[in-house]
Protein backbone atom coordinates (compact mmCIF):
# COMPACT_ATOMS: atom_id res chain seq x y z
CA UNK A 1 0.00 0.00 0.00
CA UNK A 2 2.10 2.80 1.24
CA UNK A 3 5.39 1.97 -0.45
CA UNK A 4 4.12 3.01 -3.85
CA UNK A 5 2.64 6.18 -2.43
CA UNK A 6 5.85 6.74 -0.52
CA UNK A 7 8.07 6.45 -3.57
CA UNK A 8 6.01 8.96 -5.57
CA UNK A 9 7.02 12.61 -5.27
CA UNK A 10 4.90 14.73 -2.93
CA UNK A 11 1.69 15.57 -4.75
CA UNK A 12 -0.08 18.91 -4.90
CA UNK A 13 -3.22 17.58 -3.22
CA UNK A 14 -4.10 15.69 -6.39
CA UNK A 15 -5.65 12.49 -5.07
CA UNK A 16 -9.05 12.34 -3.36
CA UNK A 17 -8.40 11.93 0.35
CA UNK A 18 -9.24 8.48 1.68
CA UNK A 19 -10.44 8.34 5.29
CA UNK A 20 -9.95 4.57 5.42
CA UNK A 21 -6.25 5.02 4.77
CA UNK A 22 -6.38 7.90 7.19
CA UNK A 23 -7.55 5.56 9.94
CA UNK A 24 -4.38 3.50 9.60
CA UNK A 25 -2.22 6.61 9.58
CA UNK A 26 -4.06 7.82 12.65
CA UNK A 27 -3.02 4.65 14.46
CA UNK A 28 0.55 4.70 13.18
CA UNK A 29 0.92 8.38 14.03
CA UNK A 30 -0.26 7.94 17.58
CA UNK A 31 -2.46 11.04 17.58
CA UNK A 32 -4.98 9.83 20.10
CA UNK A 33 -2.50 9.39 22.96
CA UNK A 34 -1.46 13.05 23.16
CA UNK A 35 -4.70 14.64 22.08
CA UNK A 36 -6.95 12.79 24.53
CA UNK A 37 -7.01 13.50 28.25
CA UNK A 38 -7.44 9.88 29.26
CA UNK A 39 -6.50 10.51 32.87
CA UNK A 40 -9.49 12.77 33.35
CA UNK A 41 -11.75 10.74 31.07
CA UNK A 42 -11.64 13.39 28.33
CA UNK A 43 -13.33 12.93 24.96
CA UNK A 44 -11.16 11.47 22.20
CA UNK A 45 -9.03 14.10 20.46
CA UNK A 46 -10.60 16.98 22.38
CA UNK A 47 -7.23 17.78 23.89
CA UNK A 48 -6.28 18.80 27.41
CA UNK A 49 -3.76 16.08 28.15
CA UNK A 50 -0.85 17.36 30.23
CA UNK A 51 2.65 16.63 28.97
CA UNK A 52 5.31 17.33 31.58
CA UNK A 53 8.66 18.37 30.15
CA UNK A 54 11.75 20.14 31.47
CA UNK A 55 10.26 23.34 30.02
CA UNK A 56 6.94 23.18 31.80
CA UNK A 57 3.62 21.53 31.15
CA UNK A 58 2.03 21.49 27.70
CA UNK A 59 -1.69 20.88 27.22
CA UNK A 60 -2.64 19.32 23.93
CA UNK A 61 -5.19 21.13 21.75
CA UNK A 62 -8.55 19.99 20.44
CA UNK A 63 -8.13 18.42 17.00
CA UNK A 64 -11.71 17.30 16.47
CA UNK A 65 -13.66 18.83 13.60
CA UNK A 66 -15.42 21.28 15.91
CA UNK A 67 -15.55 24.64 14.14
CA UNK A 68 -15.32 26.83 17.20
CA UNK A 69 -12.78 25.07 19.39
CA UNK A 70 -11.22 22.44 17.09
CA UNK A 71 -9.89 22.34 13.56
CA UNK A 72 -13.26 22.24 11.81
CA UNK A 73 -12.54 25.44 9.90
CA UNK A 74 -9.18 24.34 8.60
CA UNK A 75 -8.53 23.98 4.91
CA UNK A 76 -6.42 21.16 3.52
CA UNK A 77 -3.58 23.63 3.09
CA UNK A 78 -3.86 24.67 6.77
CA UNK A 79 -3.58 21.07 7.88
CA UNK A 80 -0.56 20.34 5.72
CA UNK A 81 1.16 23.51 6.89
CA UNK A 82 0.60 22.59 10.51
CA UNK A 83 2.28 19.22 10.17
CA UNK A 84 4.86 20.14 7.55
CA UNK A 85 5.98 23.52 8.91
CA UNK A 86 4.70 23.62 12.48
CA UNK A 87 2.61 26.77 12.02
CA UNK A 88 -0.98 27.55 12.85
CA UNK A 89 -3.41 28.88 10.24
CA UNK A 90 -2.72 32.37 11.56
CA UNK A 91 0.99 31.89 10.90
CA UNK A 92 2.18 31.64 14.52
CA UNK A 93 4.50 28.81 15.51
CA UNK A 94 3.63 25.60 17.28
CA UNK A 95 5.81 24.53 20.17
CA UNK A 96 7.74 21.41 19.20
CA UNK A 97 5.98 19.46 21.92
CA UNK A 98 3.77 18.90 18.92
CA UNK A 99 6.23 16.64 17.08
CA UNK A 100 6.00 18.35 13.70
CA UNK A 101 9.77 17.92 13.27
CA UNK A 102 8.84 14.29 12.71
CA UNK A 103 5.43 14.66 11.07
CA UNK A 104 6.96 17.10 8.59
CA UNK A 105 8.36 14.06 6.82
CA UNK A 106 4.90 12.67 6.06
CA UNK A 107 3.80 12.87 2.43
CA UNK A 108 1.05 15.33 1.45
CA UNK A 109 -1.22 12.41 0.55
CA UNK A 110 -0.79 10.85 3.97
CA UNK A 111 -1.50 14.16 5.67
CA UNK A 112 -4.70 14.66 3.72
CA UNK A 113 -5.88 11.09 4.23
CA UNK A 114 -5.33 11.65 7.94
CA UNK A 115 -7.31 14.90 7.87
CA UNK A 116 -10.15 13.18 6.04
CA UNK A 117 -10.27 10.53 8.75
CA UNK A 118 -10.15 13.06 11.59
CA UNK A 119 -13.12 14.82 10.08
CA UNK A 120 -15.20 11.64 10.25
CA UNK A 121 -14.82 11.50 14.03
CA UNK A 122 -17.20 13.20 16.48
CA UNK A 123 -16.63 16.93 16.86
CA UNK A 124 -16.26 17.98 20.48
CA UNK A 125 -16.61 21.52 21.75
CA UNK A 126 -13.77 22.00 24.20
CA UNK A 127 -11.62 25.14 24.36
CA UNK A 128 -7.87 24.68 24.51
CA UNK A 129 -6.05 25.04 27.82
CA UNK A 130 -3.06 27.39 27.74
CA UNK A 131 0.32 25.79 28.33
CA UNK A 132 2.04 26.31 31.69
CA UNK A 133 5.63 26.96 30.72
CA UNK A 134 8.66 28.41 32.53
CA UNK A 135 9.93 31.67 31.05
CA UNK A 136 11.39 32.19 28.53
CA UNK A 137 10.17 28.92 27.05
CA UNK A 138 6.60 30.17 26.94
CA UNK A 139 7.40 32.94 24.46
CA UNK A 140 5.99 31.52 21.27
CA UNK A 141 7.93 33.89 19.05
CA UNK A 142 11.18 32.31 20.25
CA UNK A 143 10.17 29.09 18.53
CA UNK A 144 11.35 30.70 15.29
CA UNK A 145 14.86 30.66 16.76
CA UNK A 146 14.46 27.05 17.83
CA UNK A 147 13.30 26.14 14.34
CA UNK A 148 16.29 27.87 12.78
CA UNK A 149 18.56 25.74 14.95
CA UNK A 150 16.83 22.41 14.82
CA UNK A 151 14.15 22.12 12.16
CA UNK A 152 14.22 21.64 8.43
CA UNK A 153 10.75 21.00 7.05
CA UNK A 154 10.24 18.54 4.22
CA UNK A 155 8.55 15.32 3.21
CA UNK A 156 10.55 12.11 3.44
CA UNK A 157 12.66 11.41 0.39
CA UNK A 158 13.31 7.70 -0.13
CA UNK A 159 16.92 6.59 -0.20
CA UNK A 160 17.31 5.01 -3.63
CA UNK A 161 20.28 2.95 -2.44
CA UNK A 162 18.18 1.13 0.14
CA UNK A 163 15.28 -1.22 -0.51
CA UNK A 164 11.56 -0.61 -0.26
CA UNK A 165 11.32 -2.28 3.13
CA UNK A 166 14.07 -0.14 4.64
CA UNK A 167 12.48 3.03 3.30
CA UNK A 168 9.11 2.02 4.62
CA UNK A 169 10.67 1.36 8.03
CA UNK A 170 12.49 4.70 7.96
CA UNK A 171 9.26 6.47 7.09
CA UNK A 172 7.36 4.71 9.87
CA UNK A 173 10.01 5.43 12.49
CA UNK A 174 11.03 8.95 11.50
CA UNK A 175 7.75 10.40 10.26
CA UNK A 176 4.60 8.68 11.49
CA UNK A 177 5.85 6.81 14.52
CA UNK A 178 7.93 9.81 15.57
CA UNK A 179 9.86 7.41 17.81
CA UNK A 180 12.81 9.78 18.06
CA UNK A 181 10.70 12.37 19.80
CA UNK A 182 10.93 10.21 22.91
CA UNK A 183 13.87 7.92 22.19
CA UNK A 184 16.42 10.50 21.01
CA UNK A 185 18.20 12.53 23.72
CA UNK A 186 17.86 16.30 23.58
CA UNK A 187 20.12 19.20 24.46
CA UNK A 188 19.35 22.01 26.89
CA UNK A 189 17.15 23.83 24.35
CA UNK A 190 15.12 20.74 23.65
CA UNK A 191 16.54 20.00 20.23
CA UNK A 192 17.23 16.38 19.37
CA UNK A 193 20.92 15.50 19.25
CA UNK A 194 21.47 14.61 15.61
CA UNK A 195 24.23 12.08 16.16
CA UNK A 196 22.30 10.23 18.86
CA UNK A 197 19.28 9.04 16.90
CA UNK A 198 17.21 6.70 19.09
CA UNK A 199 20.02 6.32 21.63
CA UNK A 200 17.73 6.82 24.63
CA UNK A 201 17.58 9.34 27.44
CA UNK A 202 17.11 9.41 31.18
CA UNK A 203 15.05 12.61 31.11
CA UNK A 204 12.18 11.71 28.88
CA UNK A 205 8.57 12.81 29.13
CA UNK A 206 7.14 12.35 32.62
CA UNK A 207 10.74 12.25 33.87
CA UNK A 208 11.24 8.66 32.83
CA UNK A 209 14.06 6.63 31.35
CA UNK A 210 13.49 6.01 27.66
CA UNK A 211 15.57 3.10 26.34
CA UNK A 212 18.32 3.12 23.75
CA UNK A 213 16.89 1.30 20.74
CA UNK A 214 19.97 1.44 18.52
CA UNK A 215 21.62 -1.91 17.81
CA UNK A 216 24.35 -1.50 20.41
CA UNK A 217 24.97 -4.85 22.09
CA UNK A 218 25.66 -3.54 25.58
CA UNK A 219 23.34 -0.55 25.98
CA UNK A 220 20.81 -0.95 23.18
CA UNK A 221 18.93 -3.72 21.42
CA UNK A 222 21.88 -5.20 19.58
CA UNK A 223 21.40 -8.63 21.13
CA UNK A 224 17.67 -8.75 20.44
CA UNK A 225 16.38 -11.09 17.78
CA UNK A 226 13.83 -9.97 15.20
CA UNK A 227 11.22 -11.86 17.20
CA UNK A 228 12.18 -9.96 20.34
CA UNK A 229 11.60 -6.62 18.64
CA UNK A 230 8.43 -7.89 17.00
CA UNK A 231 7.08 -8.99 20.37
CA UNK A 232 7.54 -5.54 21.85
CA UNK A 233 5.92 -3.79 18.93
CA UNK A 234 3.06 -6.25 18.74
CA UNK A 235 2.19 -6.73 22.40
CA UNK A 236 4.73 -5.08 24.66
CA UNK A 237 6.45 -8.34 25.64
CA UNK A 238 10.13 -7.79 26.42
CA UNK A 239 12.91 -10.36 25.88
CA UNK A 240 13.29 -10.87 29.64
CA UNK A 241 9.60 -11.78 29.76
CA UNK A 242 8.73 -8.47 31.38
CA UNK A 243 5.99 -6.29 29.87
CA UNK A 244 6.32 -2.63 29.01
CA UNK A 245 4.38 -0.29 31.23
CA UNK A 246 3.26 3.30 31.13
CA UNK A 247 4.01 5.29 28.04
CA UNK A 248 5.40 2.56 25.78
CA UNK A 249 2.37 0.52 26.72
CA UNK A 250 0.23 3.25 25.23
CA UNK A 251 2.36 3.23 22.09
CA UNK A 252 1.87 -0.51 21.73
CA UNK A 253 -1.88 -0.33 22.34
CA UNK A 254 -2.60 2.67 20.14
CA UNK A 255 0.06 2.51 17.46
CA UNK A 256 2.57 -0.30 16.92
CA UNK A 257 0.11 -2.97 17.96
CA UNK A 258 -2.21 -1.86 15.17
CA UNK A 259 0.30 -1.92 12.36
CA UNK A 260 0.42 -4.67 9.78
CA UNK A 261 3.03 -7.36 10.30
CA UNK A 262 4.80 -6.15 7.18
CA UNK A 263 5.07 -2.66 8.63
CA UNK A 264 6.42 -3.97 11.92
CA UNK A 265 9.02 -5.96 10.02
CA UNK A 266 9.98 -2.84 8.08
CA UNK A 267 10.54 -1.03 11.37
CA UNK A 268 12.79 -3.88 12.50
CA UNK A 269 14.81 -3.71 9.28
CA UNK A 270 15.29 0.02 9.77
CA UNK A 271 16.20 -0.19 13.46
CA UNK A 272 18.75 -2.90 12.87
CA UNK A 273 20.42 -0.80 10.17
CA UNK A 274 21.07 2.13 12.49
CA UNK A 275 24.46 3.10 13.79
CA UNK A 276 24.94 1.34 17.13
CA UNK A 277 25.39 3.97 19.79
CA UNK A 278 26.86 3.15 23.16
CA UNK A 279 24.71 5.13 25.55
CA UNK A 280 23.84 3.71 28.94
CA UNK A 281 20.53 5.13 30.09
CA UNK A 282 19.09 2.26 32.04
CA UNK A 283 20.59 1.24 35.33
CA UNK A 284 22.85 -1.78 34.81
CA UNK A 285 20.39 -4.15 36.44
CA UNK A 286 17.54 -2.58 34.53
CA UNK A 287 16.47 -5.82 32.93
CA UNK A 288 15.89 -7.23 36.37
CA UNK A 289 14.27 -4.16 37.84
CA UNK A 290 10.63 -4.15 38.60
CA UNK A 291 8.45 -3.45 41.56
CA UNK B 1 -2.36 11.69 98.10
CA UNK B 2 -0.03 14.57 98.77
CA UNK B 3 0.83 17.12 96.04
CA UNK B 4 4.09 15.47 95.04
CA UNK B 5 2.44 12.11 94.58
CA UNK B 6 -0.35 13.71 92.55
CA UNK B 7 2.17 15.43 90.34
CA UNK B 8 4.09 12.22 89.96
CA UNK B 9 0.96 10.30 89.07
CA UNK B 10 -0.07 12.96 86.59
CA UNK B 11 3.38 12.98 85.08
CA UNK B 12 3.43 9.21 84.70
CA UNK B 13 -0.02 9.20 83.16
CA UNK B 14 0.99 11.87 80.68
CA UNK B 15 4.14 9.94 79.92
CA UNK B 16 2.25 6.74 79.19
CA UNK B 17 -0.22 8.58 77.04
CA UNK B 18 2.59 10.21 75.09
CA UNK B 19 4.35 6.91 74.51
CA UNK B 20 1.11 5.31 73.48
CA UNK B 21 0.37 8.16 71.09
CA UNK B 22 3.78 7.98 69.47
CA UNK B 23 3.67 4.23 69.22
CA UNK B 24 0.26 4.21 67.58
CA UNK B 25 1.14 6.88 65.05
CA UNK B 26 4.61 5.49 64.46
CA UNK B 27 3.24 2.08 63.60
CA UNK B 28 0.67 3.54 61.19
CA UNK B 29 3.17 5.86 59.48
CA UNK B 30 5.75 3.23 58.57
CA UNK B 31 4.42 0.71 56.06
CA UNK B 32 6.06 -2.69 55.84
CA UNK B 33 8.46 -2.14 52.95
CA UNK B 34 9.53 -5.76 52.74
CA UNK B 35 6.62 -6.30 50.34
CA UNK B 36 8.46 -4.34 47.65
CA UNK B 37 11.28 -6.87 47.42
CA UNK B 38 8.85 -9.75 47.83
CA UNK B 39 6.74 -8.66 44.89
CA UNK B 40 9.77 -8.02 42.69
CA UNK B 41 10.91 -11.52 43.53
CA UNK B 42 7.47 -12.96 42.76
CA UNK B 43 7.27 -11.15 39.45
CA UNK B 44 10.72 -12.03 38.28
CA UNK B 45 11.40 -15.46 39.72
CA UNK B 46 7.94 -16.95 39.65
CA UNK B 47 5.72 -15.14 37.14
CA UNK B 48 8.49 -14.18 34.73
CA UNK B 49 10.29 -17.48 35.01
CA UNK B 50 7.18 -19.55 34.29
CA UNK B 51 5.97 -17.28 31.54
CA UNK B 52 9.45 -17.68 30.06
CA UNK B 53 9.02 -21.46 29.98
CA UNK B 54 5.96 -21.02 27.77
CA UNK B 55 7.73 -18.44 25.61
CA UNK B 56 10.71 -20.77 25.08
CA UNK B 57 8.38 -23.61 24.13
CA UNK B 58 6.75 -21.46 21.47
CA UNK B 59 9.80 -19.65 20.13
CA UNK B 60 12.58 -22.16 20.63
CA UNK B 61 10.79 -25.52 20.80
CA UNK B 62 12.18 -26.01 24.31
CA UNK B 63 10.42 -28.47 26.56
CA UNK B 64 7.02 -30.03 26.07
CA UNK B 65 3.36 -29.17 26.38
CA UNK B 66 3.51 -30.85 29.78
CA UNK B 67 6.13 -28.31 30.85
CA UNK B 68 3.84 -25.55 29.62
CA UNK B 69 1.00 -26.93 31.71
CA UNK B 70 3.22 -27.07 34.77
CA UNK B 71 4.29 -23.47 34.21
CA UNK B 72 0.69 -22.35 33.69
CA UNK B 73 -0.33 -24.03 36.91
CA UNK B 74 2.44 -22.20 38.72
CA UNK B 75 1.08 -18.94 37.32
CA UNK B 76 -2.41 -19.81 38.54
CA UNK B 77 -0.95 -20.32 42.01
CA UNK B 78 1.06 -17.10 41.87
CA UNK B 79 -1.69 -14.75 40.73
CA UNK B 80 -3.55 -14.47 44.06
CA UNK B 81 -0.27 -13.61 45.77
CA UNK B 82 0.11 -10.39 43.82
CA UNK B 83 -2.44 -8.00 45.28
CA UNK B 84 -1.59 -8.70 48.95
CA UNK B 85 1.97 -7.54 48.26
CA UNK B 86 0.77 -4.11 47.22
CA UNK B 87 -0.03 -2.71 50.61
CA UNK B 88 -0.90 0.94 51.07
CA UNK B 89 2.05 3.27 51.38
CA UNK B 90 4.46 1.08 49.42
CA UNK B 91 4.06 2.73 46.04
CA UNK B 92 4.70 6.05 44.36
CA UNK B 93 4.67 8.83 45.42
CA UNK B 94 5.13 7.68 49.03
CA UNK B 95 8.16 5.62 48.12
CA UNK B 96 11.27 6.71 46.22
CA UNK B 97 10.34 6.21 42.52
CA UNK B 98 13.71 4.54 42.00
CA UNK B 99 12.68 1.76 44.37
CA UNK B 100 9.31 0.93 42.92
CA UNK B 101 7.39 1.49 39.71
CA UNK B 102 4.04 0.88 41.40
CA UNK B 103 1.88 3.91 40.62
CA UNK B 104 -0.55 5.65 42.95
CA UNK B 105 -3.32 4.57 40.57
CA UNK B 106 -3.12 1.08 42.09
CA UNK B 107 -4.69 2.32 45.29
CA UNK B 108 -6.91 4.88 43.58
CA UNK B 109 -8.41 2.11 41.47
CA UNK B 110 -7.93 -0.89 43.73
CA UNK B 111 -10.84 -2.75 42.16
CA UNK B 112 -9.28 -2.39 38.71
CA UNK B 113 -5.92 -3.51 40.04
CA UNK B 114 -7.35 -6.59 41.68
CA UNK B 115 -9.25 -7.38 38.50
CA UNK B 116 -6.05 -7.25 36.47
CA UNK B 117 -4.23 -9.51 38.92
CA UNK B 118 -7.12 -11.97 38.84
CA UNK B 119 -7.01 -11.91 35.03
CA UNK B 120 -3.51 -13.35 35.16
CA UNK B 121 -4.83 -16.31 37.09
CA UNK B 122 -7.85 -16.77 34.82
CA UNK B 123 -5.84 -16.60 31.59
CA UNK B 124 -3.22 -18.94 33.03
CA UNK B 125 -5.93 -21.42 33.96
CA UNK B 126 -7.06 -21.38 30.33
CA UNK B 127 -3.47 -21.85 29.25
CA UNK B 128 -3.12 -24.85 31.52
CA UNK B 129 -6.19 -26.50 30.02
CA UNK B 130 -5.02 -25.82 26.48
CA UNK B 131 -1.54 -27.11 27.24
CA UNK B 132 -3.06 -30.35 28.43
CA UNK B 133 -4.43 -30.71 24.90
CA UNK B 134 -0.94 -30.37 23.40
CA UNK B 135 -1.83 -28.16 20.39
CA UNK B 136 1.10 -25.83 19.84
CA UNK B 137 -0.87 -23.28 17.84
CA UNK B 138 -3.55 -23.09 20.50
CA UNK B 139 -0.87 -22.68 23.15
CA UNK B 140 0.68 -19.86 21.13
CA UNK B 141 -2.64 -18.06 20.88
CA UNK B 142 -3.39 -18.36 24.56
CA UNK B 143 0.15 -17.27 25.44
CA UNK B 144 -0.54 -14.04 23.57
CA UNK B 145 -3.88 -13.61 25.31
CA UNK B 146 -2.34 -14.24 28.70
CA UNK B 147 0.33 -11.67 28.00
CA UNK B 148 -2.15 -9.10 26.83
CA UNK B 149 -4.91 -9.59 29.40
CA UNK B 150 -2.87 -10.99 32.26
CA UNK B 151 0.33 -8.96 32.10
CA UNK B 152 -0.32 -5.94 29.93
CA UNK B 153 -3.69 -5.21 31.53
CA UNK B 154 -1.88 -4.48 34.75
CA UNK B 155 1.48 -3.17 33.67
CA UNK B 156 0.14 -0.61 31.28
CA UNK B 157 -2.10 1.36 33.63
CA UNK B 158 -0.44 0.64 36.95
CA UNK B 159 3.29 0.43 36.34
CA UNK B 160 5.12 3.69 35.79
CA UNK B 161 8.31 4.61 34.04
CA UNK B 162 11.68 3.61 35.31
CA UNK B 163 13.46 6.68 36.67
CA UNK B 164 17.11 7.39 37.28
Image (cartoon, coloured by chain):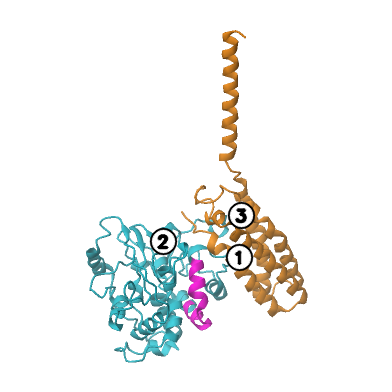
Chain colours: A cyan, B orange
Left or right of A79, for residue B2: right
Task: Provide the residue designation for mark 2.
Answer: A205
In percent of the image, x 75 and y 66: which residue is there? B70
SS for tag 3?
helix
In percent of the image, x 53 and y 81: which residue is there? A261
**Camera-side residue of A280 and A74:** A74
**Quarter of the image where one finds residue A104:** bottom left
Q: Position of residue A129 (x, y in %)?
A: 34, 63
Label 1 to label 2, Cα distance in Å?
Answer: 23 Å
Q: Is residue A204 visible?
A: no
Label 3 to label 2, Cα distance in Å?
Answer: 25 Å
Q: Is residue A83 visible?
A: yes
Asked if disc 3 and disc 1 are in contact, CB closer than 8 Å, the reply is: no
Q: Earlier in the sequence, mark 3 or mark 1?
A: 3
Mark 3 closeness class: few <14, some 14–19, many ≥20 residues within 10 Å = some
SS for tag 1?
helix
Give the numbered dot on residue A60.
none
- In the image, which residues are magenta? A248-267
Task: Provide the residue designation for mark 3.
Answer: B40
Q: Quadrant of the N terminus of chain B?
A: top right
Label 1 in the same subunit as label 2: no
Give the numbered dot on residue B151.
1
- Give the number of marks: 3
SS for tag 2?
helix
Chain of the residue under label 3: B
Front of the two marks 3 and 2: 2
Amino acid sequence: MATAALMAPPSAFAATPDPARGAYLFAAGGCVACHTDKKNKGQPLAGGRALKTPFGVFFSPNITADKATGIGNWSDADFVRALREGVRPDGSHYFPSFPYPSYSAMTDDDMLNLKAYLFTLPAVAQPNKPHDLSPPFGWRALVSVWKALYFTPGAYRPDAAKGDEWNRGAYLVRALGHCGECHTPRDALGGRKRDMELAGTDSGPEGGIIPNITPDGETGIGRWSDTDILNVLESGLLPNVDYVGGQMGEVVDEATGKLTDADRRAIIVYLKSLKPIRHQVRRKKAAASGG
Amino acid sequence: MNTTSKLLAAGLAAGFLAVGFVAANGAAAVADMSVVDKRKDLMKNVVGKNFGVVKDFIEKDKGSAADVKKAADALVAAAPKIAPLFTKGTGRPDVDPKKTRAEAKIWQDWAGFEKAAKALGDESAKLSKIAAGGDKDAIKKQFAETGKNGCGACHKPFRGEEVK
